[in-house]
């Protein structure tokens, strides 16, 4: 096996960054294939925290190649900031190690302005986006008016495309959203400067990955967001604007399906969600607060408090089927220490009928009743534990029960944010 896909199986923030950083040790190339700087992936190594938004989470390892795939939407200013910050801490000294797809789309200032203005107008019904212009950028891609890195490289073409887009977006901003217009020249000059910082990294990453896989290189594909945020399979319309499932690797990195060899799903030992939308096992008041405080559940991108709740195996089961998940990494189990009784959602009930997968209707999801199973808790802290046998009996029982409810082996248990704070049950992943 030479490729492995890592995907979040809940609503994002499952700890994908930590897991990818750990697995990157065994990989040669780490690739992001969808999303943009709506992602915030946290890596903690030697007590030092690094948050990456666009650059793959393998970047802390010397000599690994990081690829920004064509399925991503890139704000070049954020990317340059991220490169600068990483270089300041001694990473990515050789920019040859960063490859940016020439067909990835650029997030422009009007995308962010439209994202923010629309959210403001939606009021209570807002999606709760990260405000990074993700949705409007993917809209332009599908409408075939987006600007790609390859366009940025051709200054005359870029100028013409940008002029057309700024004129149209300014009309929309002024007349539909009651927002100020943006200045073409300022955007043009800024993006031309940013282009020079990134020029050497831009190229045909699809061909590069094809050749690398054919020559036996180990490639790790890093998902962003989570399956319940997938634009087709998530809790629409409270989703992001890309496909987050493993199948999106093919289109988003430009590789053929036979090159996807295995898929690992990342799940927290409980559940969180940031932004609006249905969340059947959400806990409110003191119980939700306890999980939020113990888990440090505040958004890495926006700082917003994350909504917290019990583990929902219906959500994970649905994601496992959609992604072809063969094994799981269970994260943040240490956060559950000290709770008397734990609850796990095993199914849904709605108008007398039982459901074992997430229904399509957001209305139904808002109103159904989760069916819970109770399990006894434990008091011991788990962060220093490195083997399954050393876990307190009830923690081990919790893990085993999740495995049997989902019928998927758990290969890794994360007991703290640090790279080493991990129980590796089956240490080989490729
Ligand atoms: P991602 O978006 O999936 O990469 O996840 P985030 O980085 O947004 O959020 C996960 C948060 O939990 C980060 O602050 C991590 O440092 C932290 N984290 C990851 N794994 C663990 C764990 O096992 N225990 C604890 N306590 N924190 C963890
Ligand atoms: P990582 O990769 C958690 C959520 C937003 C909002 C919805 C749409 O760190 O797990 P968008 O800005 O994408 O249009 O927002 O999706 N969202 C995330 N939630 N983790 C993420 O990424 C997210 N990226 C987007 O909060 O509800
Ligand atoms: Mg995150």
Image (cartoon, helix red, strand yellow):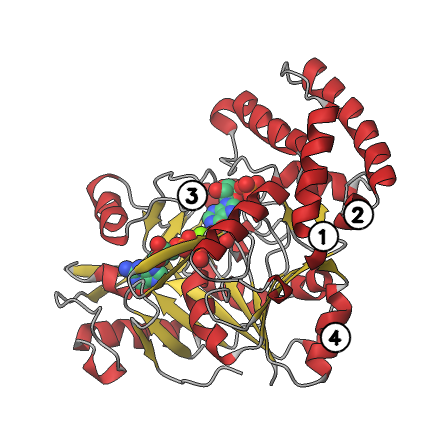
**Residue at image location 82% in from the left, 42% down from the top:** 144
- For marks 4 and 1, the one nearer the N-term is 1
The image shows residue 266, relative to residue 239, as above or below, that is: below
Question: In the image, which disc is placed on residue 153?
Answer: 2
Return the residue at label 3.
274
Residue contact at pointers 4 and 1, CB within 8 angstroms: no
Residue at screen point 86% across, 33% down: 160
Name which of mark 3 and mark 1 comes first in the sequence: 1
| Dot 2 alpha-carbon crowd within 10 angstroms: few under 14, some 14 to 19, many 20 or more | some
Measuring from the top left, give residue 426's x and y in whole percent.
Answer: 40, 85
Circle 4 residue: 210
Query: Ligand 2 within 8 A of label 1's CB?
Result: no
Q: Distance of mark 1 from mark 2, alpha carbons?
A: 8 Å
Q: Tag 3's secondary structure?
A: loop
What residue sits right under mark 1 in the picture? 199
Do the residues under discs 1 and 2 have CB atoms within 8 angstroms?
yes
Which badge, 1 or 2, is on the more N-terminal residue? 2
Which residue is drawn at the image coordinates 63% and 81% (left, top)?
217
Dot 4 falls on a residue whose secondary structure is helix
Q: Is mark 3 within 8 Å of ligand 2?
A: yes
Q: Is residue 12 left or right of 272 when viewed as pictured?
A: right
Label ID, residue 178: none
From what the image shows, is residue 148 above or below residue 405? above
């Amino acid at each position: 096996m030479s490729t492995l896909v890592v995907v979040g199986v809940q609503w994002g923030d499952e700890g994908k960054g930590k897991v990818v950083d750990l697995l990157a040790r065994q990989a040669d190339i780490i690739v992001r294939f969808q999303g943009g700087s709506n992602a915030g992936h946290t890596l903690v190594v030697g007590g030092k925290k690094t948050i990456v938004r666009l650059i793959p989470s393998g970047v802390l390892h010397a000599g690994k190649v990081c690829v920004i795939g064509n399925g991503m939407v890139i704000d070049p200013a954020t990317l340059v900031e991220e490169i600068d910050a990483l270089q300041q801490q001694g990473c990515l000294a050789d920019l040859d190690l960063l490859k940016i797809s020439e067909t990835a789309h650029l997030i422009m200032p009007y995308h962010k302005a439209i994202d923010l203005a629309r959210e403001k107008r939606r009021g209570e019904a807002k999606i709760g986006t990260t405000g990074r212009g993700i949705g409007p950028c993917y809209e332009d891609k599908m409408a075939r008016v987006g600007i790609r890195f390859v366009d940025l490289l051709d200054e005359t073409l870029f100028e013409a495309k940008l002029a057309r887009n700024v004129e149209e977006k300014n009309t929309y901003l002024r007349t539909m959203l009651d927002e100020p217009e943006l200045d073409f020249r300022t955007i043009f000059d800024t993006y031309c400067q940013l282009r020079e910082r990134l020029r050497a990294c831009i190229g045909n990453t699809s061909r590069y990955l094809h050749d690398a896989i054919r020559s036996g290189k180990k490639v790790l594909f890093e998902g962003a967001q989570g399956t319940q945020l997938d634009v087709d399979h998530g809790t629409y319309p409270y989703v992001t604007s890309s496909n987050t499932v493993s199948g999106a690797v093919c289109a988003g990195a430009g590789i053929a399906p036979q090159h996807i060899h295995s898929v690992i799903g990342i799940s927290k030992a409980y559940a969180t969600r940031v932004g609006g939308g249905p969340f059947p096992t959400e806990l409110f008041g003191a119980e939700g607060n306890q999980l939020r405080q113990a888990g440090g559940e505040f958004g890495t991108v926006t700082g917003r408090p994350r909504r917290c709740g019990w583990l929902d195996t219906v959500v994970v089961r649905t994601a496992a089927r959609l992604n072809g998940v063969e094994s799981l990494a269970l994260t943040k189990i240490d956060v559950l220490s000290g709770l008397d009784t734990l609850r796990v959602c095993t199914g849904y009930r709605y108008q007398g009928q039982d459901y074992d997968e997430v229904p399509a209707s957001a209305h139904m999801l808002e109103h159904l009743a989760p069916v819970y199973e109770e399990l006894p808790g434990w008091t011991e802290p788990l962060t220093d534990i490195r083997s399954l046998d050393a876990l307190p009996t009830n923690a081990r029982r919790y893990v085993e029960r999740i495995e049997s409810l989902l019928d998927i082996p758990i290969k890794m248990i994360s007991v703290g944010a640090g790279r080493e704070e991990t129980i590796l049950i089956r240490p080989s992943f490729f």
